[in-house]
Amino acid sequence: MNVHNEVMLSIDTIIFDFDGVIIDTETPDFLTWQKTFQSFGVDLEMELWLDHVGGRSSQFDVFKHLQDLTGLTLNESEIKQRRRQEYLDLVESYPLMPGVLDYLDICKVNALKVGLASSSPREWVEGHLSRMGILEYFDCIRSIDDVINAKPYPDLYISCMDGLSSTPKNSIAIEDSLNGVTAAKKAQMWCVAIPNSITAHLSFEKADLVLESLDQVKLIDLIKELLPNRH
């Protein structure tokens, strides 16, 4: 079945988030901070972390929280540097998220435009895409370096669609966070949410479709499921 023939009058663009969608960079972030807290005999509460990652709170200073819990004056630079290296090492051991490569292949075979919109720096995003050998799949990449406002503002998605000469009604965003879903819907796109292990308990009611992973449904079936809901 040729996906492009089926959907060329409806969907022609897929735009991925990066962190948590292409690769799980968020679980290692929590795990390495949790390990750091435990090394000082205190716990990093999941609820506070969820507020930070899940998008329900805009500010959470994890190091200040560590210092407050321990009551100690800690060497911020040393602790953050050590934790950061542990994080980078752990992230590099994680594979692509399930179904991602299949979706990228299907998009390319069927001439669908592929974009990426991330609130992370371009160096971070493109470095990992290159390492995993999938950079060439993306026709347009927009990072926090390209816009003034990160998600939940729609700037990243609007800029990426502009770069692809795409329109919101013909574009699907694939997200894993509330901030990302909000950004996509503010950009008036279709949005598929794939909650990760950190955001799984949150309500993604703003998303048009919620999946456990991309390998749960083929791209053509995903699009067909969305289309009956077209306004």
Image: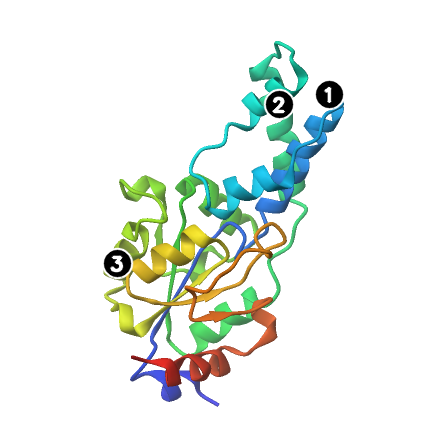
- Residue 217's x, y, as percent? 56, 77
- Residue 136's x, y, as percent? 44, 59
Provide the residue designation for mark 2. 66
Q: Secondary structure at mark 2?
A: helix
| Most foreground residue, 110 or 12 | 12
Determine whether label 2 and label 1 are within 8 Å by CB.
yes
Q: Secondary structure at mark 1?
A: loop
Instruction: Please identify the quarter of the rendering in which residue 230 is found.
Output: bottom left
Query: Around disc 3, counting alpha carbons within 10 Å, would you say few (fewer than 14), some (14 to 19), or many (20 or more)?
Result: some
- Residue 111's x, y, as percent? 37, 76
Separation of marks 2 and 1 at Cα, in angstroms: 9 Å
Query: Around disc 1, counting alpha carbons within 10 Å, would you say few (fewer than 14), some (14 to 19), or many (20 or more)?
Result: few
Does any portion of residue 140 appear in the rendered image?
no
Provide the residue designation for mark 1. 40
The residue lying at 60 percent from left, 56 percent from top is 201
Where residue 163 is drawn, which disc sits there? Answer: 3
- Amino acid found under the numbered disc labelled 3: Gly
The residue lying at 51 percent from left, 39 percent from top is 52
- Amino acid found under the numbered disc labelled 1: Phe
Q: Is residue 218 above or below residue 117?
A: below
Query: Around disc 2, counting alpha carbons within 10 Å, would you say few (fewer than 14), some (14 to 19), or many (20 or more)?
Result: many
